[in-house]
Image: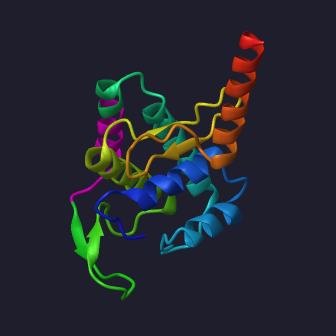
Amino acid sequence: MHLNPYGEDPVKLAADLANRRPADVTELADRCLAAGVVLDDPATRRDLVRTGEVLDAWEKVVDAADEEERAELLNRMLATAAAYPRMTNHVGTGWHLHYRDEGQSLGDVLYSLISVGTALHLAGRGMHRLRRCEVTECATIFADTSRTGRQRYCSPRCANRDAVRRHRARATTSG
């Protein structure tokens, strides 16, 4: 997976994996491949466990109380995961940056990819652009990639559900 200047693809992969955690190694590999992650070796049970650790740490970043806490938690992830940036053309698709050492397992690759991607996303778009849906009964995580940076819901369905709820609440109080 190539990191774009805003970290959008890795953050979307992190949200996808966090919102519906992979049940097994095959599902983890398939979802990573679908997102554009190059698998150097077959995924293992250790990769699945490591991915769970990555997502646990990442969800703490998502749920941080303020920007300072979010940055501190993300900096811890970066310190744990990221090696010095290096240019690579490891699969012959063009030169790009990797923030990891060669020969790392998929779980460790995901730790680096998600950490750096999230840092790029938040630094490039704004520290508030990673959150959970505002609908009370929905805990879905999303990366706000909207033009205005004011996305409050994970999907149009949740936005509509909340609009209907607010409309009915107004009708009840005025009627």
- Horizontal and vertical percent for residue 107? 50, 56
- Horizontal and vertical percent for residue 51? 55, 50
- Horizontal and vertical percent for residue 64? 42, 27
Q: Is residue 41 left or right of residue 64?
A: right
The C terminus is located in which quarter?
Answer: top right
Q: Is residue 66 left or right of residue 124?
A: right
Report whether residue 109 is seen: no
Q: Residue at x 47, y 37 (%)?
A: 57
The residue positioned farthest toward the front in the image shown: 175
Q: Residue at x 71, y 29 (%)?
A: 137
Q: Residue at x 64, y 34 (%)?
A: 139
- Horizontal and vertical percent for residue 152? 52, 37
Q: Residue 141 or 49: which is nearer the viewer?
A: 141
Q: Residue 116 or 136: which is nearer the viewer?
A: 136
Q: Which of the 4 image quadrants contains residue 33?
A: bottom right
Q: Which of the 4 image quadrants contains residue 75?
A: top left
The N terminus is located in which quarter?
Answer: bottom left
Q: Is residue 89 above or below residue 78?
A: below
Total numbered labels:
0
The segment highlighted magenta reads 72-84
Report the coloring of the rendering. rainbow
Would you say residue 139 sits in the magenta stretch?
A: no
The residue positioned farthest toward the bottom in the image shown: 92
Report whether residue 36 is seen: yes
Task: Give the prevailing secondary structure in the magenta stretch.
Answer: helix
Q: Is residue 162 above or below residue 21?
A: above
Q: Residue at x 66, y 33 (%)?
A: 163
